[in-house]
């Protein structure tokens, strides 16, 4: 192992806490998944601890270990689309300095976001879910009027649900088409 | 290049194997013992004269010296005494399994009590002796393999076993990863492969992506309660039930008969796999109360056998589903399937694998030896300082098989490190004090996929002391969880404000203390390995 490499390891290990994950893997923030994987392999070939297992200096092994653990950490976040999106938002924001490492709070936020999306798909309240499910069955059966009523009921429980409103607009349009034209009414 | 040497040891539930890779480019080779045997039963028989017989000769003693012959110790390693696996072992094993400190497992032989790593150490000692005889020199370093799905307790115990046997364990590597390394090393391929590893007592699946010299484990899944032994069990149950119906005698009531039955079951499994039919003959398996000697005679056909074990085979594919799903792949994305472990020789396994992956499993990979060969390649790499520059390198990018968790209030746990995360890795979590003047923080660390603590495996309780003392909520302690390249968990803590490292003590761990280990090393060195009497 040459002196130049030693210097590189020392500088990198010292700068580790100032680098974001893109910096750790030495790639631009626009890198594609195959580029991320290629970068991970490249850094693994350089910093994999196995390469240095027989190096007598415990200090070098320690530094390489620190770098490589961060390489793994970076890869774990960047290979996951959802985590990556959250991370990119984090480091582009004003709190960049504090958010260079993906934290448990981020992890929780990603999970929360996922849950919210899922709930919006199906409804957030028991009654909202019930009426929405009923509406979907009616849509399947082509009973637009009934579907419209069910969606309106669902919206009573979840007035803010964007997904429900979207469906209602579609269903209302369909129902409108089927309604008899003319302006008579049964009183 | 130093002339240091390290071997690779596959420490199996039923059989073990030792291999070495010497020189820079030479392919690895299995080291046979003096009788030319390449795999050795992981059986330890304690003889009358105080010596210990290990290997295929010891296996014969399972019947003749049942109480003092320990087999399948790997099923017990790193387990708690109250676990189901230990209870099951107590029912079928002829040797004494007793409780040790902190819910650990101990094995009683004659008037002595051994920890499980001490018994496994005797198997490793035999492997070391075989290697030393074959190589004509001392061997002090080794890479030892363990199932990918082993948890921290089991890995730590395996590592301890190596140390007790007088070996410096350079690395604990996963069996399927070792197999993949042996398959792909030096072949310059780019493939996604699946390693289907059905051993004597454990089942593992790993999905890997091989890119030239990089072996990236995409996911791993397993079942540490499923193996070839369970196939034998099915045959035994069938034989015993049949015998009970015919003669009104339950062979399972007598440990001597039980061992004969077990041997017959294992042989029948092998015969039926090879010949399509097995003739089971055990003359004089027991005596009726009237003193009449009764033989056991049965015929087992392929069809009968397949029906007996179908659910076990299906269980393995549930695990395959899980592994593929974690890797975000489907069976069709896999370029090659590697079979590892003796039971994968069974036609029912081969056919089912072919059906599941829609391709033939790789031939030319010896399922009994491939793991030891991979370990030997890794051992050479870890000793060498020049391999990387000489273009001989290979990089294993492995993952942790289980999520790491900490206990929270009400018996729940919180995930810290997700399963299938590449290792080595570290993650920190901040804890605050909950009382004024609190001087210690205790956390329990678990591994598993349940958010309830009782659904996970306890690794230990860590207590941190020596931080600042202040009002509640004021003192913040940052706890760092690290999983090293062996898959072993290390926990440390610092006071967030002062940066002062706190001192850590571990309790409730089933592992051996440093003091126990030292004593075990001395004891092991004092035990002499017997050479079995053989016809030349």
Image (tube, coloured by chain):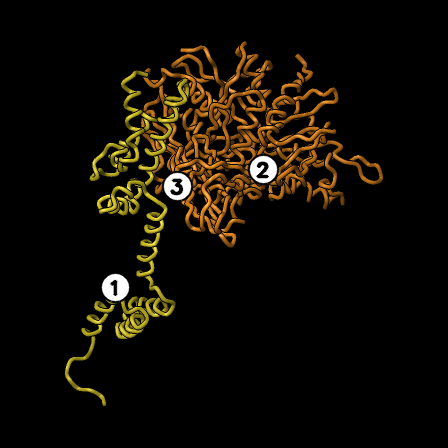
Task: Please state which of residues A187 and B90 is positioned toward the viewer in this rendering.
Answer: B90
Inspect this view and state whether residue B35 appears: yes
Q: Position of residue A10 (x, y in %)?
A: 31, 25
C-beta proximity under 8 Å, tags 1 and 2: no
- Dot 2: chain letter: B
Identify the element where label 1 is drawn: helix
Q: Which chain is orange?
A: B
Task: Please state which of residues B395 and B105 is positioned toward the viewer in this rendering.
Answer: B105
Q: Is residue A24 above or below residue B182?
A: below
Q: Position of residue A6 (x, y in %)?
A: 31, 20
User: What residue is pinned by disc 3?
Assistant: B496
Q: Position of residue B66 (x, y in %)?
A: 71, 30
Colour in which the image shows chain A: yellow
- Dot 1: chain letter: A
Which dot marks residue B510?
2
User: What residue is pinned by disc 1?
Assistant: A162
First-in-chain label (2 vs 3): 3
Locate residue B246: give its quadrant. Answer: top right
């Amino acid at each position: 192992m040459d002196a130049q490499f030693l210097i590189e390891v020392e500088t990198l290990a010292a700068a580790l806490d100032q680098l974001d994950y893109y910096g750790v893997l030495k790639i631009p923030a626009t890198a594609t998944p195959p580029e991320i994987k290629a970068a991970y392999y490249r850094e693994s070939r350089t910093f994999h601890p196995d390469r240095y297992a027989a190096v007598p200096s415990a200090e070098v092994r320690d530094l390489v270990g620190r770098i490589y653990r961060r390489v793994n950490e970076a890869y774990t976040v960047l290979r996951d689309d959802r985590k990556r999106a959250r991370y990119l938002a984090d480091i582009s924001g004003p709190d960049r300095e504090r958010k260079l490492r993906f934290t448990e709070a981020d992890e929780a936020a990603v999970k929360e976001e996922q849950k919210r999306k899922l709930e919006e798909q199906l409804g957030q309240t028991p009654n909202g879910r019930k009426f929405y499910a009923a509406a979907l069955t009616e849509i399947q059966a082509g009973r637009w009027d009934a579907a419209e009523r069910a969606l309106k009921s669902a919206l009573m429980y979840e007035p803010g649900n964007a997904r429900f409103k979207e469906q209602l607009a579609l269903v209302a349009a369909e129902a409108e088409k089927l309604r008899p034209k003319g302006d008579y009414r049964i009183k | 290049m130093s002339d240091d040497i390290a071997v690779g040891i596959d420490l199996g539930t039923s059989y073990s194997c030792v291999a070495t890779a010497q020189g820079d480019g030479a392919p690895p080779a299995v080291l046979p013992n003096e009788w030319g045997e390449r795999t050795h039963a992981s059986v330890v028989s304690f003889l009358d004269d105080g010596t210990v017989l290990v290997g295929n000769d010891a296996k014969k003693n399972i019947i003749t010296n049942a109480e003092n012959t320990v087999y399948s110790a790997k099923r017990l390693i790193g387990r708690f005494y109250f676990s189901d696996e230990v209870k099951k072992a107590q029912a079928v094993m002829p040797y004494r399994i007793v409780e040790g400190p902190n819910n650990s497992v101990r094995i009683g032989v004659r008037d002595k009590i051994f920890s499980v790593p001490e018994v496994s150490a005797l198997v490793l000692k035999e492997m070391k002796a075989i290697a030393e005889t074959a190589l004509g020199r001392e061997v002090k370093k080794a890479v030892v393999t363990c199932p990918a799905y082993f948890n921290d307790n089991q890995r730590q115990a395996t590592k301890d076993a190596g140390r007790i046997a007088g070996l410096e364990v350079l690395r604990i590597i996963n069996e399927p990863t070792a197999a993949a390394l042996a398959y792909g090393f030096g072949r310059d391929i780019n493939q996604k492969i699946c390693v289907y590893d059905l051993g004597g007592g454990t089942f593992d699946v790993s999905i890997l992506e091989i890119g030239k010299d990089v072996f990236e484990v995409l996911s791993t899944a397993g079942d540490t309660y499923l193996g070839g032994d369970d196939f034998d069990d099915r045959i035994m149950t069938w034989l015993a039930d049949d015998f009970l119906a015919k003669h009104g005698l339950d062979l399972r009531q007598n440990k001597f008969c039980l061992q004969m039955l077990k041997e017959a079951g294992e042989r029948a499994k092998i015969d039926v796999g090879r010949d399509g039919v097995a003739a089971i003959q055990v003359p004089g398996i027991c005596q009726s109360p009237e003193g009449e000697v009764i033989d056991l005679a049965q015929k087992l056909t392929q069809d009968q056998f397949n029906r007996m074990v179908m659910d076990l085979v299906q269980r393995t594919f549930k695990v395959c589903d899980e592994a593929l799903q974690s890797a975000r792949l489907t069976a069709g994305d896999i370029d090659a399937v590697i079979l590892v472990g003796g039971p994968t020789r069974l036609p029912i396994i081969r056919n089912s694998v072919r059906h599941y992956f829609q391709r033939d499993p790789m031939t030319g990979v010896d399922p009994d030896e491939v793991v030891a060969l991979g370990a030997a390649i890794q051992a050479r790499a870890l000793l060498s300082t020049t391999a990387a520059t000489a273009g001989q390198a290979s990089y294993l990018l492995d993952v942790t098989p289980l999520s790491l968790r900490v206990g929270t209030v009400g018996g729940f746990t919180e995930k810290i490190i997700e399963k299938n995360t590449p290792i080595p890795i570290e993650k920190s979590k901040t804890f605050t004090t909950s009382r004024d003047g609190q001087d210690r923080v205790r956390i329990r660390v678990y591994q598993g996929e349940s958010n309830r603590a009782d659904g996970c495996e306890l690794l230990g309780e860590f207590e941190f002391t020596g931080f600042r003392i202040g009002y509640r909520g004021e003192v913040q302690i940052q706890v760092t969880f690290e999983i090293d390249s062996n898959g072993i968990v290390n926990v440390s803590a610092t006071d967030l404000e002062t940066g002062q490292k706190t001192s850590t003590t571990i309790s409730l761990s089933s592992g051996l203390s440093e003091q126990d280990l030292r004593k075990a090393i001395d004891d092991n060195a004092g035990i002499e390995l017997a050479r079995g009497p053989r016809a030349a």
